[in-house]
């Protein structure tokens, strides 16, 4: 009996030593993996700084006393997203000196609280309407506000939004009984870019990441994460070995299928037609402006413009050149389109 006990004790000590050594080794490897990942994060920080330096060298920003602070705030504000029904995302609230976003995800402006009897002007669009690269006082809605009397202008633009998302945002406001006096759409660029990224008309940004996430959540046979799996997948070792998942868009490349060009053209014009019908039904004025883009500006690009053209995904300038003339032609016979 004693001999068996001694054998058990020796085996237990051996097993305990093996387990302890294994855990110690895993801890060392985990710490090493964490250091490697921290190095990668430092590299990302360097990339962010390189982007900010690039923007600060542009002619418009060079020498502006607010430029450096703006791009510091910008790189914080645009990395903060929250889910919104139907429109998918919205910028999280942000409180800065040059960029301010309220609890509803709306970019601040000189007069964005329509509580009186002012004429209410609601603006919709993507990053250009939101004010990418501009302080609160330099956005398109802010300039509209400056040119109007007894009016309040609310900025419902959002980073990456296309005309479908603008239309849905307008519909959501009408559902709440919030009817503007004037609605302004400033779209076009993201309709083309989203379609090219996904090879489908009406495609939105990040579709390649959103679609798998939704399908995984809705399908009954999709694996549900367990506590152990979550522990493993959140470890530095796993993240280092697995790497960041790369979900590539399904880029459309020239020569483009006629159905793609026709579809991008029609989705945008049909969205404007629906917005105009809502304006007639609810009694507000509606204006839509096609956002100008470099590939169809009609004049030679300067050095800075050429830099941005080179940064565009392959095929995107050609899709702009295929779609924009059709929209411009439609504008000649469509009262609300400019």
Image: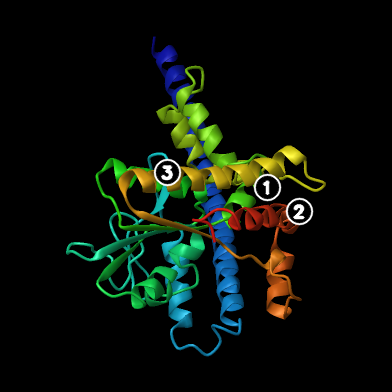
Marks 2 and 3, how far apart in space?
A: 34 Å
- In the rendered structure, find residue 277 and report the number of the disc placed on it: 3
User: In this view of the protein, can residue 206 be seen by the observer?
Assistant: no
Q: Of the two numbered discs 2 and 3 on the same chain, state the one appearing first in sequence.
A: 3
Coloration mode:
rainbow
Q: Of the two numbered discs 1 and 2 on the same chain, state the one appearing first in sequence.
A: 1
Residue sitting at 28 percent across and 50 percent down? 179
- Residue most extreme to the right: 255
Q: How many marks?
A: 3
In the depicted structure, whether residue 305 falls above or below residue 113: below
In the depicted structure, whether residue 171 falls above or below residue 114: above
Q: Of the two numbered discs 3 and 1 on the same chain, state the one appearing first in sequence.
A: 1
In contact (CB < 8 Å): disc 1 and disc 2: yes
Name the spot of residue 282 as percent of width and height, x first: 31, 46
Residue sitting at 62 percent across and 53 percent down? 330
Could you tell me which quadrant the C terminus lies in? bottom right
Name the spot of residue 258 as percent of width and height, x first: 76, 40
| Residue 182 located left or right of residue 321 | left
Q: Residues within 10 Å of mark 3 (few under 14, many from 20)?
A: few
- Residue most extreme to the left: 116
Residue under numbered circle 1:
196
In the depicted structure, whether residue 61 falls above or below residue 238: below
In contact (CB < 8 Å): disc 3 and disc 1: no
| Residue 119 located left or right of residue 250 | left
Marks 3 and 1, how far apart in space?
A: 28 Å
Name the spot of residue 297 as percent of width and height, x first: 69, 69
Q: Secondary structure at mark 3?
A: helix
| Residue 159 located left or right of residue 100 | right
Residue sitting at 61 percent across and 76 percent down? 54
Q: Secondary structure at mark 2?
A: loop
- Residue most extreme to the top: 1
């Amino acid at each position: 009996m004693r001999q068996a006990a001694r054998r058990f004790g020796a085996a237990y000590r051996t097993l305990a030593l093996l387990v302890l050594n294994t855990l110690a080794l895993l801890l060392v490897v985990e710490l090493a993996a964490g250091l490697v990942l921290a190095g990668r994060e430092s590299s990302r920080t360097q990339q962010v700084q390189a982007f900010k330096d690039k923007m600060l060298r542009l002619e418009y920003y060079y020498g502006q006393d607010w430029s450096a602070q703006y791009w510091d705030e910008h790189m914080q504000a645009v990395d903060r997203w929250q889910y919104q029904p139907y429109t998918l995302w919205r910028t999280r609230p942000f409180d800065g000196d040059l960029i301010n976003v309220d609890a509803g995800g709306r970019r601040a402006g000189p007069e964005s609280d329509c509580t009186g009897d002012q004429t209410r002007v609601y603006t919709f669009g993507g990053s250009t309407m939101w004010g990418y690269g501009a302080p609160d006082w330099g956005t398109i809605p802010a300039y509209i506000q400056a040119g109007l009397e007894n009016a309040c202008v609310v900025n419902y633009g959002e980073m990456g939004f296309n005309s479908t998302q603008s239309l849905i945002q307008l519909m959501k406001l009408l559902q709440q009984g919030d009817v503007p006096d004037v609605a302004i759409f400033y779209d076009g660029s993201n309709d083309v870019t989203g379609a090219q990224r996904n090879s489908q008309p009406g495609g939105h940004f990040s579709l390649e990441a959103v679609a798998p996430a939704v399908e995984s959540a809705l399908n009954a046979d999709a694996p549900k994460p367990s506590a152990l799996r979550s522990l493993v997948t959140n470890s530095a070792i796993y993240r280092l070995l697995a790497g960041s998942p790369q979900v590539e868009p399904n880029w459309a490349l020239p020569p483009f299928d006629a159905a793609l060009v026709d579809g991008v053209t029609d989705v945008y014009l049909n969205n404007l037609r629906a917005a105009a019908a809502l304006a007639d039904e609810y009694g507000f004025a509606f204006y839509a402006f096609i956002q100008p883009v470099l590939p169809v500006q009609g004049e030679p690009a300067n050095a800075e413009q050429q830099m941005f053209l080179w940064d565009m995904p392959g095929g995107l300038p050609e899709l702009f050149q295929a779609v924009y003339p059709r929209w411009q032609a439609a504008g000649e016979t469509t009262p609300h389109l400019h």
